[in-house]
Image (spheres, helix red, strand yellow):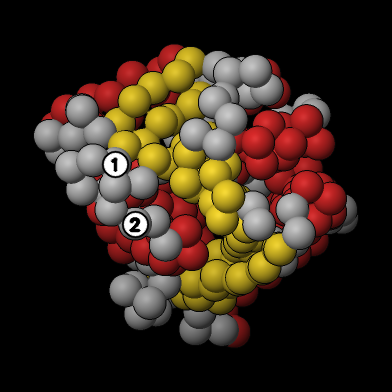
Amino acid sequence: MTEQFYRDIAALQQAGTACLDHELHDRDAWVLAQLDARAGENILNIGCDSNQQTVALARSLGQDGYVLAIDRSYRALTALSQCSQQAGLERHIRFLYRNLDDLAGHLHSEGVHRVICGRALAQIRRPQAVFRAIRQALRPGGVFLFYGPARKDLLELRLFHANLRNELRESRELTFVEQTGVPHARDAFIRVEMASFECPLHFASPDTLYAYWRACDLYEEELDREFRYAAAQHFQSRATFETAQRLIGVKATNE
């Protein structure tokens, strides 16, 4: 799904979507709470999923800490650099332009206190090598937190969509954390913990449901008319359409 809808509650409100208890269901706040970074620490941020999240993390590290942001997208790093300057944090956010599969050999051994990675992790081709490189980069007691969509993320909307095409598809991103990430984390780390995040979404009209579907990765132009019709049919007998953003977070400790 598009990052705009995962990181920006205001965008959901503008689309006519209600996410109950916004403060309790703030994804970035949940992620940072799981990471539990401390002032003065050095944090490795793999993949620039959310500029707001990275800026908030850098701000929490005080004068002596910093975030090293690694991404294979020059555009993503440039956007983050602009955000860091606007926030007055350019001295506390550093950048490394690198393919994520090539981390080994580019990270200092035991050089960082914590590592955080979101949706970008599902794009790597050699997860075992990447997990080893991350473990070697962590100091003793350091934490590696990665997260991504659960297999049931937006399940109700995906089933609604699947009914139009008579097929329910599962992307690699939907299955990566639970099927690939957790086993590799357990191979590389002794202590691995899991946590879940859920933000209920309530759509009050066919137009708001359609707007959300059109803005996410489920959208298929050839199903546009069918989806509009199905949405209108749904609201003839129901007041709302409900689904939820569902994430899985995995916290591995380098003991």
Residue type beneath disc 2: Arg
Tally of numbered discs:
2
Instruction: State the residue at coordinates (39%, 56%).
Output: 37
Numbered badge on residue 164: none
Residue 82 point in image, percent of width and height: 23, 25
Instruction: State the residue at coordinates (66%, 57%).
Output: 255
Residue type beneath disc 1: Gly
Q: Is residue 60 visible?
A: yes
Instruction: State the residue at coordinates (36%, 36%).
Output: 67
Classify 39 as above or below 98. below
Q: Count neighbours of disc 2 (C-alpha within 10 A) and say few if under 14, some if 14 to 19, many if 20 or more.
A: some
Q: Nearer the viewer, residue 172 or 142?
A: 142
Q: Would you say the residues marked 1 and 2 are in contact, meaning their CB atoms lie under 8 Å apart? A: yes
Residue 59 point in image, percent of width and height: 23, 47
Q: Is residue 150 left or right of residue 69?
A: right
Q: Nearer the viewer, residue 189 or 95?
A: 189
Sequence-wise first label, 1 or 2: 2
Classify 14 as above or below 57. below
Numbered badge on residue 65: 1
Question: Label 2 belongs to which residue?
Answer: 38
Which residue ends up furthest to the right in the rendered image? 166
Question: Which corner quadrant of the image does residue 104 belong to?
Answer: top right
Question: Which corner quadrant of the image does residue 242 belong to?
Answer: bottom right
Q: Is residue 20 left or right of residue 106?
A: left
Q: Is residue 248 left or right of residue 68?
A: right
